[in-house]
Amino acid sequence: MKVNSGDFVMPGDFLSVSEQFLPGDGAYEDDGSVRSGVPGNVNIDNNQKEISVISKSGSPNLLKVGDIVYGEIKDLRGQRALVTVYSKKGTDRQLALPYMAAIHISQVTLAYIDRLSDAFRIGDLIEAKVVKIMGDNLDLNTEDPGCGVVKAMCTKCRAFMKVDNSEELYCPNCDRKEKRKISENYDD
Ligand SMILES: [Zn+2]
C-alpha cells in the first residue's frame, strides 16, 4: 500500500516505512513504520523526507518528550509501574492516541527506593514527565518535585489521603500512614 499527498487517513493508518520518511506533524513512528496520529489528509514533503497529516480540527494533540502528563497507576509489575495516561497538563483537549506508559523504578525518584510500592499504589493519580515515546507507548519519569502522586486513596479504607511529610501520606479516616513519591502539587 502506498499513500499519496491528499489521501484521507485515520489514526493508526500506515503511511510509510520509517527508513523512507520521517514523521512530521500528525504522524508518529511505531516500530519501523510511520503512522497517522489523527484523521486528516496526507502531506508528503519529498525534499525534507517528511510525511505529515493535516487535521481539519487543528494540530493534533500528540505528546512529545518533555511534556507533563496526568495518569493513573494501573499495575505494579516487578521494576515497572504501568500507567494509563489521561491528559497533557495545561490543555483540556483529548489526546490523539490512547497512550499507555511505564515508569521504571530507577526513574521514580532521585533517592534510592527498594520497592515500587514505597512510591505508588494502584489507583494513584500521578503527574509525570514524558522521557521516551515509541508510538503510543511512553516512558515516564517522576523525579521532578512537581511530579509524583497528586491524589491517592488509603489502601485500607479508600478515603482520600493527606500529606503527612515529604515521604508519607496519612488517612484522615483511619490514621493509616503510607509511603509515596509525593508531588509538590498533591491535591490535599
Ligand atoms: Zn484509611
Image: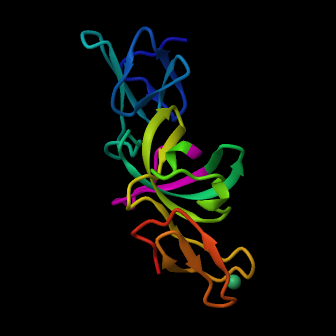
Is residue 117 left or right of 4 when viewed as pictured? right
Query: Which x, y percent locates residue 49?
Result: 31, 12
Q: Is residue 88 magenta?
A: yes
Q: Of 94 and 129, which appears nearest the observer?
A: 129
Q: How many marks?
A: 0
Q: Is residue 39 above or below residue 187?
A: above
The one of 112 and 183 positioned closer to us in this rendering: 112
Work out whether residue 102 can be spotted. Answer: no
- In the image, which residues are magenta? 83-105
Q: Nearer the viewer, residue 148 or 57?
A: 148
Residue 36: percent from the left, percent from the top?
47, 30
Q: Going by the picture, which residue comes out furthest to the right? A: 156
Q: Quadrant of ligand 1?
A: bottom right
Q: Is residue 75 visible?
A: yes
Q: Residue at x 35, y 26 (%)?
A: 52
**Would residue 147 be found to the left or right of residue 154 on screen?**
left
In the depicted structure, whether residue 95 falls above or below residue 31: below
Residue drawn at (55%, 31%) of the image: 12
Depth order, front residue of 69/93: 69
Quadrant in which the N terminus appears: top right
Q: Position of residue 72 (x, y in %)?
A: 59, 59
Quarter of the figure with residue 183? bottom left
Above or below residue 142? Residue 177 is below
Q: Residue at x 58, y 46 (%)?
A: 105
